[in-house]
Image (cartoon, helix red, strand yellow):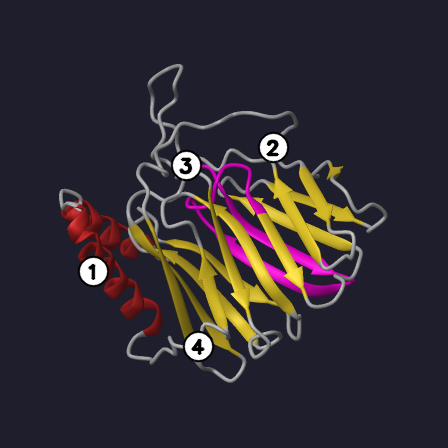
Amino acid sequence: MSRSLRLVAFGVLCALGGADASAAGAASGGAWDLLRAHYYASREFGEVDEGFMHVEAPMSTPDPAATPVSLHFGDAARGKIKELRLFIDNNPSPVVATLDIGAGQPITEIDFRVRVDRATAVRAVAETTDGKLEMRSAWVRAEGGCSAPPAGSGEGKVGDVRFRSADDGRSLQVGIRHPNYSGFQIDPKTGDPIPPHYVSHVKLTAGGKPLVEIESGISISENPTFRIVSDAPIATPVTLEASDSKDAHFSATWDGAATRAVAATGTR
């Protein structure tokens, strides 16, 4: 998303920020109108078939700073989605992530943990290999996810990577230790604003072929974690290459030798 559009979208949300809960839908619609015009102009969306794709998220999140969001893909969608964008309409930076899915990869589900700043629609817009657009959404009630103080828990250093595979090899969770500061948080010790610092790019390859590539921003939670589920066992080795907004680079490889949590020190 361009800096100018982020400022426009943020301005709309600030103007509507005093509205009560009954106006939340209107606020979401205003932000979405800007985003839709920028990314998709007058292109039409398919919005009906939940069997093709659907978004799963809690209606009322217990943790606005780490809200689970799952994208599910049906038989007709597997291997046929070229690009997907995830939006949280009423977040200060509404574009959560842009995903390029490897050609022919039979992915059935992708899971995230995200920050949700206020009541909002969470939308997934997929472009299929034949150039069509499909959009699905869910409604989430939340407050303050983007300004919640950092947890700062756990051991390890920035850039450490953890892989966790299911016993059957058909799902893989990848976590990156990183503060992913949003730019809206306050340091609880000093009272000063914490500048934004977030993972901006993640590339995963499986068996030497592209699995998924993700451009992300401040709406992804601290210590970004992605879970990918496939119709078939995910090929190994799995290699992660990532970079952040300060141009630090991290990489790690998992050879499939263990199915449980495996830590790999990210190299810069």
Is 204 covered by the magenta stretch? yes
Q: Is residue 8 left or right of residue 112?
A: left
Marks 4/3 in contact by CB < 8 Å: the verdict is no
Reading the image, the residue beneath label 4 is: 49
Q: CA distance from mark 4 to mark 3?
A: 38 Å
Q: CA distance from mark 3 to mark 2?
A: 15 Å
Residue type at tag 1? Gly
User: Element under label 3?
Assistant: loop
Q: CA distance from mark 2 to mark 4?
A: 41 Å
Image quadrant in which the C terminus is located? top right
Reading the image, the residue beneath label 3 is: 196
Reading the image, the residue beneath label 1 is: 30
**Which segment is the magenta one?**
196-225
Residue 255, above or below 197? below
Is 260 covered by the magenta stretch? no
Marks 1/2 in contact by CB < 8 Å: the verdict is no
Q: CA distance from mark 1 to mark 2?
A: 37 Å
Marks 2/4 in contact by CB < 8 Å: the verdict is no
Mark 4 vs mark 1: in front? 4
